[in-house]
Amino acid sequence: MQFSEMAAKIGKGQGFIAALDQSGGSTPKALKGYGVEEGAWSSDEEMFALIHDMRSRIITSPSFTGEKVLGAILFERTMDGMVDGKPTPQALIERGVVPFLKIDKGLEDEANGVQLMKPIPGLDTLLARARGLGVFGTKERSVIHLANAGGIAAVVAQQFDVAQQVLAAGMVPIIEPEVNIKSAERADADRILRDELLKALDAMPGDDKVMLKLSIPAEAGLFDALVAHPRVLRVVALSGGFARPEACAELAKNKGMIASFSRALLQDLRHQMSAEEFDAALGGAIDEIHAASTAKAPVAA
């Protein structure tokens, strides 16, 4: 796939984006969910080798193709690794799946009800390397805990600053200002975030497009204006801690939003499964998430 073909697939394709980007801090939890306990490795290298084996198993599964999986978000080590004897981005592209790269380096401590991104040193070098490997876009995450207007404005401003750096490197950024779905102020935070995003999108120079990765809003349809905005290539949803059935049910209420799930995609997979059991579990999850992304629930009158 050429860049223009990737953009068309992500912008108009009927499917969802798989989030395979657990990093250092979340890797032990991801492995435990996969049935691999912490005693199974004695170094970070062994731990990352185990998570890469899991991701390789997912990517090479017969059900993991571009028919329903439009794209996949990778951790940097996964991007630099090999799948089926090929660089991971190439292996994805050959399966019809558009590769993205997680570029943030984690979160600052909470202030003003939000967690900004930590600095991302060497970002231009990383972007050039990723682009050379065929990676289409990036993902960068912040977290919003409270409906603090100043904090949310700061999150959006930082995200769009990084997005401009990504766009300048010839890639498409996924802006991810996650609203904590357990927040007592979730609905108000959703509205403030929507309005700040609309202002930032309207103020973008040039004619480049960005993507948005957002928590499923407490009020169905709240992000319709973002979905329709001419500077937005696609709006994708994170599962945010919802188990897959609930995440899919909530997503299906929001037209135009597609999934970009991690835990909700992988929750039934286990290291101990046979190839047939693994493929069946992954295929079932892909079918369920694909349906929630494409076959929307009717909106109540």
Image (cartoon, grey):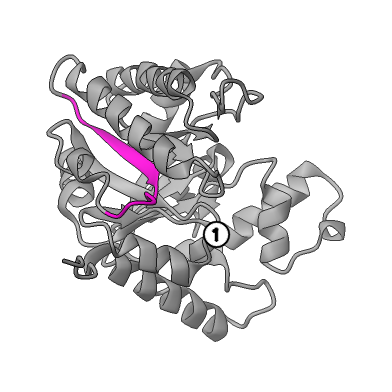
- Relative to 250, say whether 198 is above or below: above
**Label 1 CA crowd tier, 10 Å (few <14, some 14–19, many 20+):** many
Q: Position of residue 82 (x, y in %)?
A: 53, 50
Numbered label tally: 1
Q: Seen in the image, is 177 located left or right of residue 53?
A: left
Q: Position of residue 121 (x, y in %)?
A: 56, 15
Q: Position of residue 59 (x, y in %)?
A: 46, 62
Membership of 15 in magenta stretch: no
Q: Quadrant of residue 66?
A: bottom left
Q: Nearer the viewer, residue 116 or 286?
A: 116
Q: Quadrant of residue 230?
A: top left
Residue denoted by label 1: 263
Residue 61 shows in this picture: no
- At 31% across and 18% down in the image, what residue appears? 164
Q: Seen in the image, is 103 located left or right of residue 229?
A: right
Q: Position of residue 246 (x, y in %)?
A: 45, 68
- At 73% across and 62% down in the image, what residue appears? 32
Membership of 210 in magenta stretch: yes
Give the secondary structure at mark 1. Answer: helix
- At 40% across and 20% down in the image, what residue appears? 153
Q: Which residues are magenta?
A: 208-220
